Image (tube, helix red, strand yellow):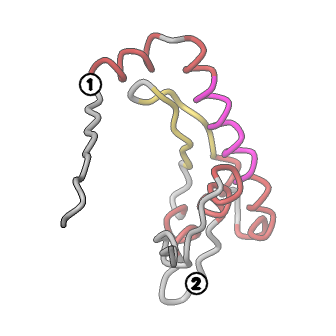
Amino acid sequence: MARPRTTVRVKVDRRALTNYLHRSPEMQEALRARALLLKEAADANAAIIRDTGHHYERTYVRKFRGGYQVVNGDTFSFIIEYGSVNNPAYRPLTRAADKVFGTDFHENGKPEESDG
């Protein structure tokens, strides 16, 4: 005899959630605080590449689509982050995300697969 299955489906109203995030001062401050933590961690990780130039002197936090975004304006930020044929991937920003958000990224920028 087959066991009966119960399925619960939760639907989130994206507009309502977005409006809440945009209008709530508490949520905005929490998002801003996390972005600043990410920037500080990325700046600390950049110590290994200080001799390459001013890469992390150009890192800043900006308001973006109802939240905050950590941006690096350096011309070579992509190569420093992900590497190239001739350069290793230093990954200062993704390593910072690992530390701040508890993620675990491989060298290629994809999260590790869990065994469970």
Q: Nearer the viewer, residue 73 or 28?
A: 28
Label 1 belongs to which residue? 13
Q: Magenta stretch?
A: 30-42
Tell me, for residue 87, which label it has, or none.
2
Nearer to me, 50 or 27: 27
Outermost residue toward the bottom in this view = 86
Mark 2: give few (<14), some (14-19) or many (20+) Cα within 10 Å.
few
| Residue at the image position 63 percent from the left and 26 percent from the top | 30
Mark 1 is on which residue type?
Answer: Asp
Residue 31: name its quadrant: top right
Which quadrant would the N terminus be assigned to in this image? bottom left
Q: Earlier in the sequence, mark 2 or mark 1?
A: 1
- Whether the magenta-drawn stretch holds residue 34 is answered as yes
Was residue 111 drawn as part of the magenta stretch in this picture?
no
* Residue 112 location (% of width, % of height): 52, 74
Give me the disc on residue 88: none
Q: Secondary structure at mark 2?
A: loop
Q: Is residue 3 left or right of residue 110?
A: left
Amino acid at circle 2: Asn
